[in-house]
Image (spheres, rainbow, N blue to C red):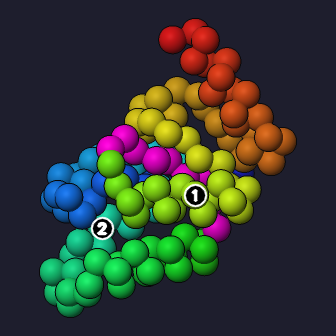
């Protein structure tokens, strides 16, 4: 089967412009997938919401339940104002799940793997890489 791929939860703006937010999150997910990660993109729930709409609060609650249940290895927090994404990032920080603030391309350049996360090296790699940008 090979080495376990990192499960990366993609968090980013949605409610201010669902189509644009979903597009950006899906593009980030594609970049992550092509780089060998397993992205989880909750923005794709846009289809569910078209078929069977729920309130914004229901969607906030659902994505928090999803985040808690899937226990990702890392959360990629895309740029932009987003109360839901801020809540997801805070949950991860409080539960020891690393949060990377930035674009998927920046994250992929760091070449973070499961060993880096387990050994707490993800933040060190980011700082080291930032010094070289």
Q: Secondary structure at mark 2?
A: helix
Residue beneath disc 1: 90
The answer to whether residue 5 is left or right of residue 46 is right
Residue at 71 percent across and 51 percent down: it is: 3
Q: Earlier in the sequence, mark 2 or mark 1?
A: 2
Residue beneath disc 2: 44
Is residue 79 one of those drawn in magenta?
yes
Which sits in the foreground, 83 or 64?
83
Q: Nearer the viewer, mark 2 or mark 1?
A: 1
Q: Residue 61, can we see it?
A: yes
Residue at 43 percent across and 81 percent down: it is: 62
Residue 119 in picture, x, y percent from top left: 84, 42
Which sits in the foreground, 117 or 101?
101
Q: Is residue 68 above or below residue 90?
A: below
Residue lying furthest top in this view? 132
Q: Residues within 10 Å of mark 2 (few under 14, many from 20)?
A: some
Q: Is residue 24 above or below residue 132?
A: below
Q: Residue 34, can we see it?
A: no
Q: Secondary structure at mark 1?
A: helix
Q: Which residues are magenta?
A: 71-80
Q: Residue 46 shows which numbered tag? A: none
- Taken as a whole, is the magenta stretch helix, strand or loop? loop
């Amino acid at each position: 089967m090979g080495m376990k791929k990192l499960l990366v939860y993609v968090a980013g703006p949605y409610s201010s412009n669902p189509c644009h937010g979903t597009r950006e999150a899906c593009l980030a997910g594609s970049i992550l997938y092509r780089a060998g990660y397993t992205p989880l993109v909750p923005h794709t729930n846009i289809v569910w919401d078209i078929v069977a709409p729920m309130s914004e609060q229901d969607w906030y609650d659902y994505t928090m339940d999803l985040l808690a249940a899937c226990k990702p290895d890392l959360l990629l927090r895309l740029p932009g104002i987003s109360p839901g994404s801020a809540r997801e990032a805070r949950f991860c920080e409080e539960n020891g799940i690393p949060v990377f603030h930035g674009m998927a391309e920046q994250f992929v350049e760091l070449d973070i793997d499961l060993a880096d996360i387990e050994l707490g090296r993800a933040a060190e790699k980011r700082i080291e890489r930032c010094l070289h940008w």
